[in-house]
Image (cartoon, helix red, strand yellow):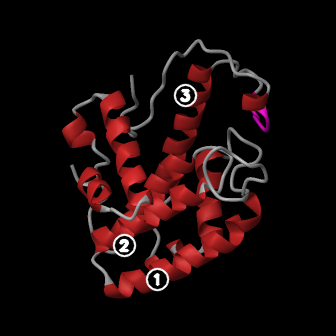
């Protein structure tokens, strides 16, 4: 099962209870299962998309804008939305480096936008933002929305994120997405470039 707006969001077993660690910072006390959490987050994201327009390039390529975007997408659900994570995770960089690396990313993306094709700019931007993994949760969805806004700022259509070639098979689409991200980790951006437009 998936949502109409995110072909990569695996909802999984909606009855799986949330543990104490999963509930840290949760604003909505009625949420007790993974399914309820996914539904609340998705509603928050849809409201954020309705309230926000794609920003101009200079506005988007700012670390404060990226934090504000995360807050808009997840702030109705999570108290920490829009705040960089302070804990180590199994993926992502050291929390002490997040602010500097995010500022470096937006500075690099400004330069890329002057010299590279829009697809290359947005794919590299998305990959590095997800690799930094700046927030406790929602990094993939936030990174995809930011990349779509970047494409619009570069006067291009937003990415399909594998929705066309995936034809509704969320698990296969996620598998391809994660494999493409891993290839990009090794410097091969081709699979990610192919994925985002198919």
The reply to whether the C-beta atoms of the residues labelled 1 and 3 are less than 8 Å apart is no
Q: Is residue 2 left or right of residue 59?
A: left
Q: SS of the residue at dot 3?
A: helix
Residue at point 31%, 81% (across, down): 116
Residue 112 visible at all? yes
Q: Furthest residue to the top?
A: 15
Mark 3 or mark 2: which comes first in sequence?
3
The residue labelled by disc 3 is: 39
Q: SS of the residue at dot 1?
A: helix
| For residue 54, above or below residue 142 | below
Q: Residue 37: x and y, percent?
A: 62, 27
Q: CA–CA distance between discs 3 and 2? A: 31 Å
Q: Residue 44: x and y, percent?
A: 57, 40
Q: Residue 81: x and y, percent?
A: 70, 49
86 inside magenta stretch = no
Start and end of the magenta stretch? 24-28
The residue labelled by disc 1 is: 110
27 inside magenta stretch = yes
Q: Quadrant of the N terminus?
A: top left
The residue labelled by disc 2 is: 121
């Amino acid at each position: 099962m998936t949502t109409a707006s995110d072909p990569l969001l695996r909802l999984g077993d909606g009855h799986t209870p949330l543990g104490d660690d999963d509930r840290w910072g949760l604003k909505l006390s009625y949420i007790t299962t993974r399914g309820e959490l996914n539904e609340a987050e998705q509603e928050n994201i849809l409201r954020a998309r309705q309230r926000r327009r794609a920003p101009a390039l200079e506005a988007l390529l700012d670390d404060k804008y990226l934090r504000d975007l995360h807050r808009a997408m997840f702030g109705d659900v999570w108290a920490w939305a829009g705040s960089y994570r302070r804990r180590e995770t199994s993926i992502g960089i050291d929390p002490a480096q997040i602010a500097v690396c995010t500022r470096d990313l937006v500075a690099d993306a400004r330069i890329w936008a002057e010299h590279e094709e829009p697809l290359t700019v947005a794919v590299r931007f998305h990959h590095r933002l997800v690799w930094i993994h700046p927030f406790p949760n929602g990094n993939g969805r936030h990174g995809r929305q930011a990349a779509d806004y970047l494409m619009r700022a570069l006067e291009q259509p937003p990415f399909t994120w594998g929705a066309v070639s995936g034809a509704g098979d969320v698990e296969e689409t996620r598998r391809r997405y994660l494999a493409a991200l891993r290839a990009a980790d090794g410097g091969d951006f081709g699979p990610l470039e192919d994925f985002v437009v198919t």
